Amino acid sequence: MAERPYILLSCGMSIDGYLDDAGPERLLLSNVADFDRVDEVRAGCDAILVGASTIRQDNPRLLVRSAERRAARIARGEQPDPVKVTVTSSCHLDPDASFFTTGDSAKLVYCAAPSLVAAEKLLGDRATVVDGGDPVDVRRVASDLAARGIGRLMVEGGGRMHTQFLTAGIADELHLVVAPFFVGDSRAPRFVHDGDFPWGPRNRAALAEVRQIGDVVLLRYALSDRFEH
């Protein structure tokens, strides 16, 4: 068994690198055709991971939308939706969030060790709570997911999660969609935070594909020697 899943990061951002604006409503950065592409990628993964802040801010369902793709997963002997995964230090989560209440797939919460007991009490049978370390270590998360049979993991954000997986050097592939507008507000969340990234001016990431999808562009980067062409 592999020591970690194949890890694919997926993100949409504005031209100036923001994931959202500073308003209360979620900013849509993509279009219908690209949302369908993301749905196809989701359908090919064993698990989808988002950070706890994404659950609080966006209340995502993280389900495969296409009936045909759901049927194909069932035909392969899989659940119609991938396993849902989140990472949290404080377990400041709502048990009634869509992450926990939609879909029949397993829900895994990797929690910092000091919050483990409180998380188990809060979430009850809505999710399996796992000790993620203190602080939570995404390498440990990835290793545990592999032990649970997850072969392909899709990380959908937010910025802190992207930063942790990238700086840990365990990302294999990045799908970066650029929307044709600026946010222009430093209060808004960015694609990544400060960090020591393996890719810099002396080690440039390999650009594997550029694809126009309506008014957005997909940049697909190969980040490891495990990259699947």
Image (cartoon, rainbow, N blue to C red):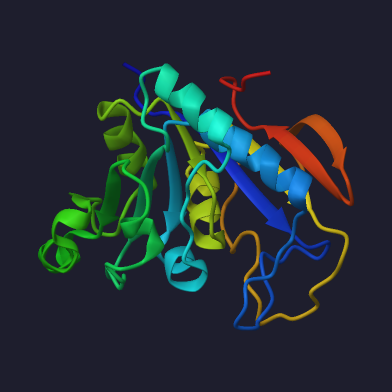
Question: Residue 228 falls in which quadrant of the image?
Answer: top right
* Residue 205, placed above or below residue 138: above
Image quarter hosting the N terminus: top left
> Left or right: 148 with respect to 138?
left
Q: In terms of depth relative to the viewer, which is nearer, 223 or 63?
A: 63
Number of marks in picture: 0
Rendered location of residue 181, percent (x, y): 87, 66
Residue 199, image x, y percentages: 67, 41
Residue drawn at x 19%, y 63% as measured from the top left? 123
Judge from the rendering whether residue 183 lies leftward or rightward of residue 41; answer left or right.
right
**Residue 165 falls left or right of residue 177:** left
Rendered location of residue 84, percent (x, y): 37, 46
> At 65% from the left edge and 66% from the top edge, which residue is drawn?
190
Residue visible at 49% across and 46% down in the picture: 165
Q: Determine the image quadrant of residue 91.
A: bottom left
User: At 60% across and 40% down in the image, what residue appears?
Assistant: 39
Relative to 61, 150 lies left or right: left
- Report if residue 166 is visible in the image: yes
Residue 205 visible? The answer is no
Quadrant into which the C terminus falls: top right
Q: Nearer the viewer, residue 20 or 17?
A: 20
